[in-house]
Image (tube, coloured by chain):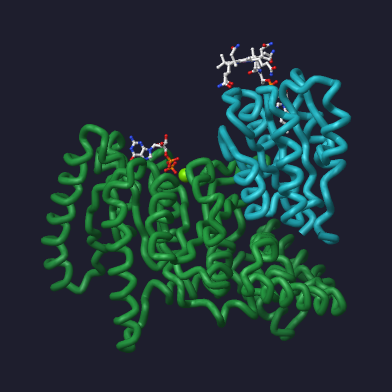
Amino acid sequence: MSDRPIKVLIAKPGLDGHDRGAKVLARGLRDEGFEVIYTGLRQTPEMIVTAALQEDVDVVGLSILSGAHMTLLPKITAGLKAEGLDDVLVTAGGIIPDDDIAALKAAGIAAVFGPGTTIARVAEFIRANVRSRAGA
Amino acid sequence: MTGGVSEPARSQAAKRGRDLAERARAGERRPLARLLTEVEDRTPTGEAALRILYPLAGAAHLVGVTGAPGSGKSTLVAALVGEARRDGRRVAVLAIDPSSPITGGAILGDRVRMQAHAGDRDVFIRSMASRGHAGGLAAATVAAAAVFDAVGFPLVFIETVGTGQAEVEVAAIADTTVVVQAPEMGDEVQAIKAGLLEVADLVVVNKGDRPGAHRAAAQLRAMLTVGRQNDRVAAESGRPRPKRPDVLLATALSGEGVPELLAALDRREAARRAATDDGEVDATRLIRARAQLHGILGERVRARLAEPALEADTALLVRAVADHELDPYAAADRALDLLAGRSRVG
Ligand code: B12
Ligand SMILES: Nc1nc2c(ncn2[C@@H]2O[C@H](COP(=O)(O)OP(=O)(O)O)[C@@H](O)[C@H]2O)c(=O)[nH]1
Ligand SMILES: [Mg+2]
């Protein structure tokens, strides 16, 4: 069905305890009509990849404010690829310096959203870029 | 949903459904995940796969876990999964949370408590939003559980929020229904009002580490004993009797009481199996089958009435009811006549 809600996984990789942004995002996307799977704090790349796989999500959203994004995020995109999940839209947000964005995009992160991002913008980006089911 | 689907689309769905079913049965996780999506979305592909898988299902023990939010259902399921993994059983979990009736969105947060099993390829956890389907959550849940069953998970936990309305559905979905109660919500009268205790096969007082847990368990047991005495009277007068569940104490966080709970579940399943082997009819499975059949019938009828050949006549019937020219019962009878090709409305 084309009217099925888009499924989004919101995950917090690593030992980062800043979960306000992730929770704001989870609730905001729920209110935008998305089905949001929230896995909580301190997720290893393996946990995130497994959740994305089992839940058959359309989107993985990674929230990270700890500064460890350059090591963790590429591990996650590599893990997704290894499981054949390369058609999943991967986005990230939190505290990520502009200088790092190009490298993250090269690693498969479709877009990076910083502080002050509105939910509406995130929702719009997802709707515009999410995979279509039929081809998957 | 076969109604409005063209022939080539249908045969393509059949092919895709067969492919997903075969690969899921071979143990591939991604096709299983996709299959669950197809089933949840009630697509022709999902239907085609279910037609293959349903006859292969029936061996699994479906355990419903319900209770108030925060009582510890997810934590308890995670602990039960860990316990069942000790003897090597593959375990599946379906965790269901409500959708917003307004936006259709949902936050599915049960996985938070179950992430310890992420590295275990023999544990498969899937969240599902209730989506306010006509016929409720039962149809998609029962279908998803049948998929797990058919692809080789002998134990399937189904977590649902006990809202006080969905009890009957919960009880019909599972073979065994566990109602989880936390001591701080310990006013057992609440639980009775909610009707949840009536569908319980087992009651677990969780958070055994909290003060009042033992007391809550004792109160529940006492209450159920009084109930049993009433049952004798009821039996004599032939009135239906509610279930009289055992009450167990557990601490999901530490794992205390969890082996005993799994053992109780296993004993119940063994008894159920022995009874059906002796030719007894499994009343719970009958209720489930009836709910499935009725749900699909409703879906099929709606789809047929929406087909081009009947759409206009159906709209006329709806209009006539809206205008109070026809009562809805007569309209429904006419709609059935339409389906049987016996008459036109106009
Ligand atoms: C509040 C806060 C805390 C709270 C966190 C409470 C909580 N439960 O979340 C507390 C006090 C606990 C805390 C602790 C620490 N903090 Co602090 N904290 C902050 C602060 C001030 C605000 C963060 C916040 O909540 N913002 C509000 C939310 C809504 O915004 P957000 O998370 O940015 O999310 C938005 C966007 O980024 C985006 N987004 C976020 N994630 C995602 C994901 C996706 C997929 C998408 C699409 C979008 C998206 O959308 C959201 C909505 O707009 C920031 C500074 C800052 N200005 O960001 C520092 C900051 C993040 N903390 C910092 C540090 C260093 C720490 C500590 C290590 C110690 C310390 N010096 O205080 C500890 C470590 C805690 C831990 N265990 O990890 C540093 C991090 C430095 C770095 N990365 O290099 C910062 C940047 C402060 C600084 N300038 O030094 N912190
Ligand atoms: N003290 C204590 N807390 C528990 C126990 N089991 C679960 N909890 C906590 O209760 C809260 C709700 O648990 P959760 O499993 O999400 O409940 P659910 O909403 O019923 O699925 C969490 O903070 C758990 O850590 C327990 O045995 N003892
Ligand atoms: Mg839960």
Res. B333 visible in picture: yes
Whether residue B304 is visible to the viewer of this picture, yes or no, is no
In which quadrant of the rendered view does residue B50 lie?
Answer: bottom right
Side of A100 relative to B149 (left or right) = right
The one nearer the camera, B43 or B304, is B43
Q: Residue at x 74, y 74 (%)?
A: B2
The vertical placement of B176 against B276, above or below, is above
Please tell me which residue is depicted at 34% across the width and 83% down the height of the picture: B276
Q: Is residue B212 left or right of residue A28?
A: left
- Image position of B321 with respect to B98: above or below: below
Q: Quadrant of the N terminus of chain B?
A: bottom right
Chain A: its colour in the image is: cyan
| Residue at the front extreme of this rendering | A71
- Please give the name of the residue rendered at 64% of the width and 34% of the height, measured from the top-left corner: A13
User: Residue B145 in the image: x percent, y percent?
Assistant: 53, 66
- Which residue is painted at 70% across and 76% down in the image? B48
Quadrant for residue B330, please give it: bottom right
Among the chains pictured, the one given green colouring is B
- In x, y percent, where is residue B280? 32, 84
Q: Quadrant of residue B315?
A: bottom right
Q: Nearer the viewer, residue B110 or B23?
A: B23
Residue A121 position within the rendered picture, expressed as x and y whole percent measured from the top left:
81, 29
Q: Quadrant of the C terminus of chain B?
A: bottom right
Viewed as shown, does residue A3 lie left or right of B222? right
* B199 is higher (above) or lower (below) than B339: above
| Ligand 2 falls in quadrant | top left
Among all residues in the image, which is located at the extreme bottom? B279
Residue in front for this viewpoint, B280 or A39: A39
Residue B75 % position (x, y): 42, 45
Q: In the rendered picture of this protein, how many numbered marks are placed on residues?
A: 0
